[in-house]
Image: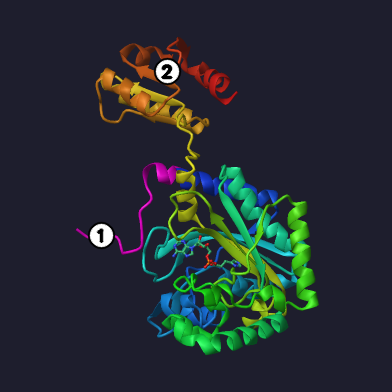
Amino acid sequence: MIQKPKGTYDVYGKNGKTLLETENIIKSLMDKYNYEYVRTPLFESSDLFHRGVGETTDIVSKETYDFLDRGNRSMTLRPEGTAGIVRSFIENKMYSSVLQPVKTWYYGPMYRYERPQSGRFREFYQFGVEVFGTESPIMDAEVISIAVNFYKLLGLKEIKVNINSLGDTESRNNYREALKNYFKPHLELLCDDCKKRFEKNPLRIIDCKYDSNLDIIKNAPKIIDYLNEESKNHFLQVQEYLDTLEIDYIINPNVVRGLDYYTHTVFEVEANVKGFGSQNVLCGGGRYDSLVETIGGPKTPGVGFAMGMERLLSALELENIDLVETDNLDIYIIPIDDKLKYSVYLTNLLRINGFNVDMDYLNRKLISNFKQADRMDAKFVIIIGEEENNSKIVTIKNNKTKEEYKISEEEIIDFFDKFIKE
Ligand code: HAM
């Protein structure tokens, strides 16, 4: 028996319905905010992620799925969406669009060779947004509010929004130096990964999962104290706009994020519900004002987020939120005595007129067909026997009230229009 690859999963049954429902909600939410859908390839040239996400990040140094294609080009399955969207923004010259800022959204699978555990997969789905062309703190606040309003719309209550600022390049460099001076005499206390981070990316020591309880980490200098006036001012304005948008948040100096491209605002939304495992970050994002330039485009500020769909589904389950409508089926058609042709005809007629219809394909007994209609939560049942087949007048039973109607084929669409669509 061939099994699915480690760290992957199948979607079927009720989870499939919940997922499709959340996807529908995402689409209509993005229309409300006037964001445009963008789809980029699942694989890109490896260079894109090395340059975009950063050589020293865990994602690029340990987690990418890399392969040589048959033309000996080094390709990588995308570990995240931002770098590909930025590549597309540059390649398709979206920066010269008359519609500015360019507000995009995306949805699709991402690949990271991580150690699988609850909430952490090797293939997982992200919904994300990326906005290009404005440094305005309004956009940082809007992007955060999209994520929060989406969770609220689904009914999630137990969420916590953590925000922080990494400042501009000057502030970040000052902070880097301060961290290096601070950690230098205590290197032996840190884990092996953090020892490596010390030289190349000391900010990542702050959110190390292994060392987080050490006093040395807790007492480390905070970025907030190293922000220059401009960065401080930007961050304050983000907070003011979040207040205007009525978004609750906590300023958390330990949120530094695992990707190299961030400047100014960074944020994470956590599931705060009991029973959630350690992978409780539902959504992460922030501003990246140098990334477009790093990848070879004109200097363009950007801000965005991505959220994991698997963790979202877990949060919905833990908060007992059911998005799936059970009475989706309008009509169940039961052929008796092999009156299959007319049943097939009627099923098709009703489906193409906009109703959700199923029929018995298995020649079941009447009683088990009624059970089937109940299990499917059908609103109406139509029985097609000898008489109905000849007269084209069918018996329709309301499966909830048990009332019965005799309706001719000519009137059947009007009948269901009245009872179902209205
Ligand atoms: P990230 O924090 O690496 O950020 O991922 C965003 C979200 O994707 C996480 O909060 C989590 O919900 C989900 N996620 C990440 N890895 C896994 C995994 N192995 N299994 C399941 N879910 C996972 C980014 O990807 C950035 N591109 C976000 C961004 C967009 N920043 C600016 N724009």
Instruction: Say which of marks 1 and 2 sits in front.
Output: 1
Q: Is mark 1 within 8 Å of ligand 1?
A: no
Whichever of callouts 1 and 2 sits on the residue coming sooner in the sequence is 1
Res. 178 image quadrant: bottom right
- Whole-Å distance between the Cαs marked 1 and 2? 41 Å
Farthest residue, direction left: 1
Q: Look at 53% across and 52% down and name the residue there.
A: 272
The label shown at residue 299 is none
> Label 2 belongs to which residue?
399
Q: Look at 54% across and 79% down and name the residue there.
A: 48
Residue 28 position, x and y percent, is 62, 47
Q: Look at 52% across and 82% down and name the residue there.
A: 50
Q: Main secondary structure of the magenta part?
A: loop
Element type at marker 2?
loop
Give the magenta part as a residue range.
1-17
> Label 1 belongs to which residue?
3
Residue 272 horizontal side relative to residue 387, left or right? right
Residue 36 position, x and y percent, is 65, 58
Other-residue count near label 1 (Cα within 10 Å), few / some / many at <14 / 14–19 / ≥20:
few
Residue type at numbered disc 2: Asn
Residue 274 position, x and y percent, is 47, 49
